[in-house]
Structure formats: C-alpha cells, structure tokens
Amino acid sequence: MNKIKITVIIIFLLCLQGVVKAQEVVNYDGYFQVIGGKLEILTDTNSNMPIEAAIASKNYIKSKTDFPNLLTTNFSYWVRVTLKNSSANKTLGIQISQAIIDYVDFYQETDGKIVQSNFSGHRRPFYNRIVNHQSFIYPVNVSPNQETTIYLHVKSGKQLILPVYAGTLSQVFEHALRKDITFGIYIGIILVMILYNLFVFYSVRDKNYLYYVSYLAIVLIAQASIEGYLFRFLLPNYPAVADNLIYITTALIGFAAIEFCKSFLDSKHYTPKMHKISYIFYVFYIIQIIFALCGQYNTSYVIMEPTAMLSALFVLAMAIIILRKGSRSAKFFLIAWSFFILCVVIYGLKDFNILPYNSLTDSALLIGSAFEAVMLSLALADRINVFKAEKERSQEETVRALQENERIIREQNVILEAKVEERTHELSEANHELNITLDDLKQAQTQLVESEKMASLGQLTAGIAHEINNPINFVTSNVNPLKRDIDMMLEALTVIEEISASDASTAEKQKKIQDYKEELDFDYLTLEIKHLIRGINEGANRTAEIVKGLKIFSRLDEDDLKKADLNEGLESTMVIANNLLNNKITVVKEYDKNLPLAECYAGKLNQVFLNIISNAIYAIHKRFEEQGGQLLLKTAYDDQNIYITIKDNGTGMDEQTQKKMFEPFFTTKDVGEGTGLGMSITYNTIKKHNGQIMVDSKLGEGTEFTLQIPIIFNVKAT
C-alpha cells in the first residue's frame, strides 16, 4: 500500500514539474505588442548548440523584463517564444529592433517541423535578411487559432539587448518606419548644423567651426553605424567593415570631441595641465580600435563605454574650471555638454542593466547629440558677437589713433589694403575650391547612375549562393561515404593479399576470400562507390552550369560592341534571378531557336533583362502570396529586328504610372526597396541600341514589355 502511495506521489510530482516548465504562449489578438517578457532564454556557453538540442533543452529561463539585457559576453543565447494567432491574419511579423546584433539565426517550428529558417546578423551580408531593413524583421505564417514556436540563436560582441515585438507585418513595418523617420529628423538636424557652421567657417575663418563640423560629421557616421543605416545603405556587402566602423567611429568621436572642446575652450591657455592630461584618453581610444581590428569585439566594447563616459566627465570638469576663470564661451558649452553627458550616462546605465530599456533610453544618444549640436552651434554663433564687439573696439581705437597721428593713418591704410588683397585672394581660392567641389558632385551624380546599373545584381548575388549550395551539398555529402568505402576496399585488398600469401591450399584461399567478400558485402560496396561517384559528378556538372550562366550574364566585355545570342542572355539572367521566384512562380519560355545573333552591348542588355524581370517578379509576389504567378519569356525576329517579350500577371500599372515609369528616381516600391533608377537606365540602354521599348499594362491584370533590338547596330547621326 505504501509503495502505491509513493508511486502516485512521484507521478504527481512529475506531472507538476511538467506543468511548471510548460512554455508560456503569447496570444496575439490583433494588437502590436512587446513580447520580451514572454521570452525564454537558454545560455549556450560553447556557442555551438544545434537547433535540435535547443528544441529539446529543458533549461530555458523565462525573461524577467520586457527588454532582456544579456550584457556583453562571449556566450551565445537561444531564445524561444510560442505564438498563438487569435486574429484573422494569416501572416504575423516578429521584429528585433536592436540593429547591431552580430549573428541572428531564426527558426520557425510548427507541428514539430522547422518550416522556416534564416541566418543573418550585423556580421553577415545584409541581403541574407528576409526583409531589407536594419532591424531584424521575420514574416511568420500561422493560421488563425494555431500556434507556432520561434527560436532565435543570437550572439554579439556588443551590448546584447533584445527588444522583441510581435504584430502583423504592416504593424511591424509601421513601427520600423517610425524609427526611420525619427533618425531622418536627427540626420536633418545634424546636416543643417554642419552646413550652417561650414558657412560660418568660410565667412570668419575660425578653426573652431572646422573642428566642430568634423566632430558633427563623425557623430553622424557613428550614429548611422550604431543604428544600422550605414550597413543597410552603404555597406550591405561588407559586414565586417560596417561592424568594425562601430568601434572605430565611436573612438573617433572621442578624439574629435576632446579636440573641439580644447580648441573651443582654449584649454591650453586656461588649464594647461588638463590640456596635457586629455591625451591619456587618446591612448584608450587607440587600444579600443586595436582590440576591434584584432577581433576582440567584446573587450573593445567593454573599453568603449567607460572611456566615453570618463572622457565626457573630464571635459565637463575642464569646462567648469574655465568658466570660473571668466570664459564666456564656457557658459554655453556647459549647457550643451551637461545635457549630452546626462544622455550618455542614461544610455550607458541602460547597457549595464541599471536603467530599463525603452524608447527614451535607447534614443538617449540621438537626443543628446542633436541637442548638443544645436546648443554648441549657438555657442559658436555667440563667438561672432564677441568677434564683432572686438572689431568695434578695434575700430574705435584705430579712429583715435588716426586722429592723433597722420603717419599711423597711412600705415594702417597700407595694412588694410594688404589685408583686403589677401582676403580677396582667399575668397578667389575658396571660389575655385567650390567650383572643383561642384565638378566632383556632378561626377559623383554620374557615377551614381552608372553604379545603379549593377545595383540589382549586387542584391541578387547572395541568391547565387543558394543556387550553388544545392549541387555543392550533393558533392560534399557524398565525399565522406566515398572515403569510407574506399578505405574498406583498401583494407579488403590487404586482407586478400594476406590470404594469398598464406600456406593454405588454393581451394582454402579461394574459400576464405569468398567468405570475406560476403562478410564485407563486396558487391554492394562496389555498387555504392559507383553511385557516390555518379552523384559527385552530377553535382559538379550542375555547379559548372550555374557558374557558366553567371559568367555569361556578367559579360566582362560589356563595353565592347559584339554579336551575342539574346536567348542565351535571357537564360543566364534567369539563373541570376532564379532565387527570387521562391518556387511560387511558373516560368514559360518560348524562345525562337533560329534567333540570329544581335550586334549589341551584351552586358548592358542583360542588365535590362534583369531590371524588367525583377520588377515583374516583384509585381507577381505583390499580387499572389502563394501560387498563381506566371512569367512569360518569348523571343522572335524579322529581317531587321529581334523582339523580346517579358510578360507577367502581377499587379499591373495605371496610366499615370506608365507615363512616369521611365523618369529617374520614380518608383512605386516601398521605401528602401528601390531607387527609381532601374527603368530609367533600361530606357536609355534600349535607346542607345537604337531600339524601342513598348509597354502594355492593365491594373490588376499584369504587364507586358516588348523590346525591339536591331540585328545590326547602326550609329545614328547626331
């Protein structure tokens, strides 16, 4: 009887344990919400735990805050959350608004199966991301009243905070857009301050303005790096560079801030000892950069924050001392710098988990630097009043001196004329420099248009890895079994040689050899080796076909006029664009096999094909969430021209859009998804070939592009 009671108690405790450890479900009822407090976190001390082990682990600990702060460690972390869709939407969205997490592995598990995965992060190529945004946004397909579990594997060499939100995709995009607008306002404030102070510098030639402009420019670059915009817009294919810039620019801010403050406050005159002591901070900033460049990111980040706070407090103390010694400039400086230090301290205390993470503490640096920029500009503007007052006093003294002595008047006139000539010469040089700058800007504009021609190729290059990965995996998965089988064959040869060298009779030797072959299953081993070699051969051939398509598309000789097979160009373009199809679009190819070679710039035409096909795929995905999309590629010719037709059944265009579609910078895509130069370049390329581009589109039904390319390239008279 006692045994039965004990058994019942044990079963009850086990059941109770299962209840206690049961995973909490986040119920999504249609409202955008923070889900950080519902996250469960597992520390991966070796940073190599596979997803299967993470799913099976019972060691998750529930987050105690809405914004988990995992500090700065060498560990990685598994984070999971289960969502229940209690709304009518079929697609939800998950957003991690922390932009500079080094590695983020995303998995979606539904009914015990991994239905979606993605591997991105600030130290991986930008276009690995499902959504091209500096924060991490993941669409999650889950039917109403159904559940799905999200697993995140995160690791970072910087402060690791997880502000995680859930909502519909539109709600997530709206939240991301608000962040973008806020940063855009910040950029506007800083740029206005930069331009204003540059203008004043060219007027008064005070080096303090130049120091301040340099400081503001570095602050802008650093903030763009920390918020992920530099990686998103300028360095999407260079994650290591973008990530190292965070450590480098934050150190450079320290350099620039201290140099500006010393110059503005004239510390060399008022506080010569503190002026010399300030160079100690330069050593720490250099050490910070060295650690980052050596890959010691956690150490670099740990050095960065206390050094920044201590240097800011040092400058504050120096400004207070200088104010007490009668410096008028120090008063305005203290107002701006005190508020900035307060914001730096708030931001740092948030990283050390002393203050809670929220929109205010996360934006503390932006708010502080924007306020500082405005106030320091006012402080610099006050210097103009000081200069003006000094100039007026100088003029009064000059008048009195001129009245006292006519000789001094003549000397002063000579000096004044010399200064006017010198100033005129300086203005002439400045005007010349401005003209050079204007020419550089025009060249930069031309380079921007030219670089756009290959921008979409840059976006799609990551897709080539997906295309090549399948056949390469086919090869690599066969190598180890083949090595094993060959080792067994070699071992078999050794055994057979030993049997052959023995003193047994021929019949006994043959029997031993036959028995060993049956034990080894020699026939199956031979068949398996042939099968593995055939698999490796097929994978290598498929990889060669993909590389050949990419080589044809790239056309390193694209600036040369040559004869080319446009069927081949279309086919190589589809190799590049294949990963955009997502296995949801049917491609119909109606190529004329007798198509003649066209005299053309093959690389430029391939870019035209890619621009139109990319837009077609975008329009199809916009209309069809799942299956139903169709893309038609057709070629034909007559005596003088070749005709290429690219037709889709996507969203189509209205008449107003069709009228503007070839204008530079016009786009119907969402912010961040297109520059508006693709179709303008397409139009100019076709015109360069003396061809025509015809468009037939109906809103809601689809679009058909027909390109007319002359078989023989004729240069038109200008």
Image (cartoon, helix red, strand yellow):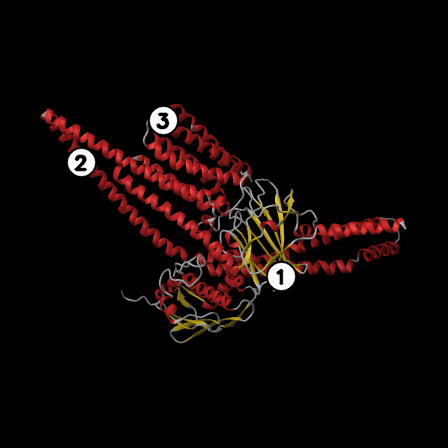
Q: Which residue is mark 3?
A: 324
Disc 3: CA contacts within 10 A as few (<14), some (14-19) or many (>=20): few
Closer to the camera in the image, 539 or 330: 330
The residue that appears at 29% across and 49% down in the rendered structure is: 438
Between label 2 and label 3, give the one nearer the viewer.
Answer: 3
Asked where in the image residue 167 lies, by quadrant, the reply is: bottom right
Which residue is label 1 attached to?
Answer: 538
The amino acid marked with disc number 3 is Arg
Gap between marks 3 and 1 measured at Cα: 81 Å
60 left or right of 355 in image: right
Pinpoint residue 261: horizontal percent, then vertical percent. Answer: 37, 33
Q: Which secondary structure, mark 1?
A: helix
Number of the front mark, 2 or 1: 2
Query: Label 3 near label 2: C-beta < 8 Å?
Result: no
Label 2: state its secondary structure.
Answer: helix
Task: Locate residue 475: give its quadrant.
Answer: bottom right
Q: Which mark is residue 226?
A: none
Q: Is residue 323 above or below residue 431?
A: above
* Residue under label 2: 420
The Cα–Cα distance between marks 2 and 3, rounded to whole angstroms, is 38 Å
View extreme (top): residue: 273
Q: Is residue 493 visible?
A: no
**Quarter of the image containing the C terminus?**
bottom left
Give the residue type at disc 1. Answer: Glu
* Cα separation between marks 2 and 1: 81 Å
Residue sticking out furthest to the bottom = 638
Q: Give percent across and percent down for residue 226.
A: 47, 45
